[in-house]
Amino acid sequence: MRKNGRYTLIEMVIAVGIFGMVMLCAAMGLAAIQKTWSSITVQNQRMRSCQLIDTVVDSSFRNAVPFTWSDSNRKSRTVFLGESGRIIVAYQHRINDVSEGGIRFLSLFVDNGMLVAEYRKTPMLPWEKGKASSETFSEILAERIKSVSFMYAGRRKQDIYWTSAWEPDENNNNIPLAVQIRVEWSNGDSEVWMRRTAGAGLRESYGVRTDKE
């Protein structure tokens, strides 16, 4: 009760308690909003990353072709690296200017939690590892990446098989019939992309294809 326009101690305690409950509810609401906003931001970033990965995979794997280059011994070798955690591939590129050439070279790998794509107009030679080039352009496709793994499709007679490593045959310029990439995010989720390479049908292919026994 108020006496002479003043609040009693009980009324003050009740008022402070109500104010504290209101502030607590407001803080919880703001925390929930912040958590939701952070989740939406991460999901949007992941979606953009997936779209970028899909674009790169679609343009490079789908248009991948055999490409040969001479090594230091003047032996013609296929410019292709098919490891479980890294790929180097030559692919047909849309020509905007004749000087650009119609072939591009791409390397995909994970570095410090980031999926990195390296591009070059000149050949990336897998047998010359560690040699840098000023012509290389790097692009970060995604962050918060735990690992990336590649699978490569081949053919034995009429049967399709998958392997985690691909070594071009010495007697021909074969590249895989298809390439699959699996990206695992830091939270444990994963995404998979798969594309058939150019001319990888049963009746047509670039270069000479010999079925493995």
Image (tube, rainbow, N blue to C red):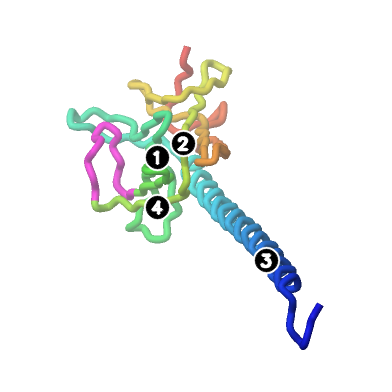
Element under disc 4:
strand
Would residue 31 be found to the left or right of residue 139 on screen?
A: right
Residue farthest along the front direction in this orientation: 3
| Rendered view: 124 above or below 204 | below
| Distance from the alpha carbon under mark 2 to that under mark 4 | 16 Å
Q: Earlier in the sequence, mark 2 or mark 4?
A: 4
Circle 2 sits in a helix, a strand or a loop, which is it? Answer: strand
Left or right of residue 73, residue 172 in this image:
right
Measured from the top left, where is residue 150 in percent x and y?
47, 32
- Horizontal side, residue 146 vs residue 37: left or right: left
What numbered label is drawn on residue 148? 2
User: If the image is split into quadrants, where does the N terminus sit?
Assistant: bottom right
Identified by mark 1, the residue type is Phe
Q: Are marks 3 and 4 in contact (CB under 8 Å)?
A: no
Magenta span has 164? no
Residue picked out by circle 3: 20
| Image coords of residue 160 (percent x, y) | 56, 21
Q: Residue 139, labelled with which disc?
A: 4
Residue beneath the point at 52% across and 41% down: 185
